[in-house]
Image (cartoon, coloured by chain):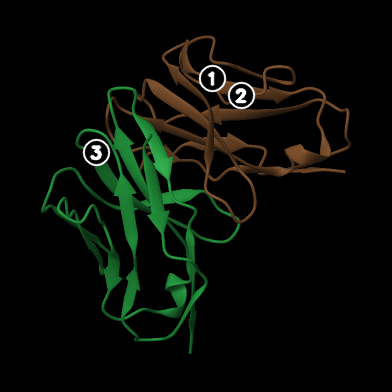
């Protein structure tokens, strides 16, 4: 069964450092999502791509976060500089149009 | 705007007990409804879905019926197992932008 791949699974960094997360969606899924999930809460959408174009990044803190999907397949989410409050699970999901989203295993970020 | 309200957790049950997790929603139009499950340290897994009123989604012994008249999508299972211990998220999908709105999640703890 096809799955969404994410790496790394765990990342520990110090504040002010740069971090990057990678996501490879299910083959054929044109829509890709990055979510942030703070412990004990539901996922919050950071950015949504349709192919290589950003559809929604209204909740992305653009002063420090960036996301790209250059060839419309895999995607990278970057944080620079990381802050203590960025500690969370970062989830990637993909879908076909107007279809259920399938999530990857997530990257657990700890900022010290 | 769209919103999902779930019952507060944690829910603690003995093995083989009956489970109900309440979910109600507010949405414009006709959303699709989902239940996702998250095991400790993992991403979200799609558990079941329903796309129109009176649809019943089912998977792994879990069921939920899309009730338009009460705007509800309650999750049920007749006999829970220890392995069902997880956090359960209710979510709705509206519009062509494929944006998921999540509830805050309900933690289920099943004991022997």
Residue, disc 1: A57
Query: As displayed, is residue B47 above or below residue A93?
Result: below
Name the residue rendered at 27%, 46% in the picture. B33
Indicate the chain coloured brown by its letter: A
In the rendered image, the vertical position of residue A43 relative to residue A45, given as above or below: below
Task: Classify the position of the C terminus of chain A by image quarter.
Answer: top right
Q: Secondary structure at mark 2?
A: loop
Which disc is residue A60 wearing?
2
Query: Measuring 28% from the left and 27% from the top, which residue is drawn there?
Result: B95
Query: Which residue occupies the extreme left position in the image?
Result: B54
Residue corresponding to mark 3: B31
Q: Which chain, by letter, is green?
A: B
Q: Are marks 2 and 1 in contact (CB under 8 Å)?
A: yes
Left or right: B61 as drawn, with respect to A48: left
- Sort mark 2 into few (<14), some (14-19) or many (20+) by Cα contacts within 10 Å: some
Are discs 3 and 2 less than 8 Å apart at CB? Answer: no
Q: Nearer the viewer, residue B53 or B83?
A: B53
Circle on res. B81: none
Specify the subunit that label 1 lies on: A
- Which quarter of the figure has residue A58? top right
Q: Position of residue A10 (x, y in %)?
A: 71, 45
Give residue A82's position: percent from left, percent from top: 81, 30
| Residue B98 x %, y % | 34, 28
Residue A92 against residue A43 in the figure, above or below: above
Label 3: how many residues lie within 10 Å, few (<14), some (14-19) or many (20+)? many
Q: Is residue B76 left or right of residue A70?
A: left
């Amino acid at each position: 069964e096809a799955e969404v791949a994410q790496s790394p699974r765990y990342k520990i960094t110090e504040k002010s450092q740069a971090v990057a997360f990678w996501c490879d969606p299910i083959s054929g899924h044109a829509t890709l999502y990055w979510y942030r999930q703070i412990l004990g809460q539901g996922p919050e959408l950071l950015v949504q791509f349709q192919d290589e174009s950003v559809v929604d990044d209204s909740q992305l803190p653009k002063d420090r976060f960036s996301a790209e999907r250059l060839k419309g397949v895999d995607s990278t989410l970057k944080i620079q500089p990381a802050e203590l409050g960025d500690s969370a699970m970062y989830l990637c999901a993909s879908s076909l149009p107007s279809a259920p989203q399938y999530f990857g295993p997530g990257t657990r970020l700890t900022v010290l | 705007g769209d919103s999902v309200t779930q019952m507060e957790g944690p829910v603690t049950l003995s093995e083989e007990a009956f489970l109900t997790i309440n979910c109600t929603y507010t949405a414009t139009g006709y959303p699709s409804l989902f239940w996702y499950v998250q095991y400790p340290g993992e991403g979200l897994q799609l558990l079941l879905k329903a796309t129109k009123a009176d649809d019943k989604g089912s998977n792994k012994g879990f069921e939920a019926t899309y009730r338009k008249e009460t705007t509800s999508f309650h999750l049920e299972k007749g006999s829970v197992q220890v392995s069902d211990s997880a956090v359960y998220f209710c979510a709705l999908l509206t519009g062509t932008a494929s944006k998921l709105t999540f509830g805050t999640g309900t933690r289920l703890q099943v004991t022997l």
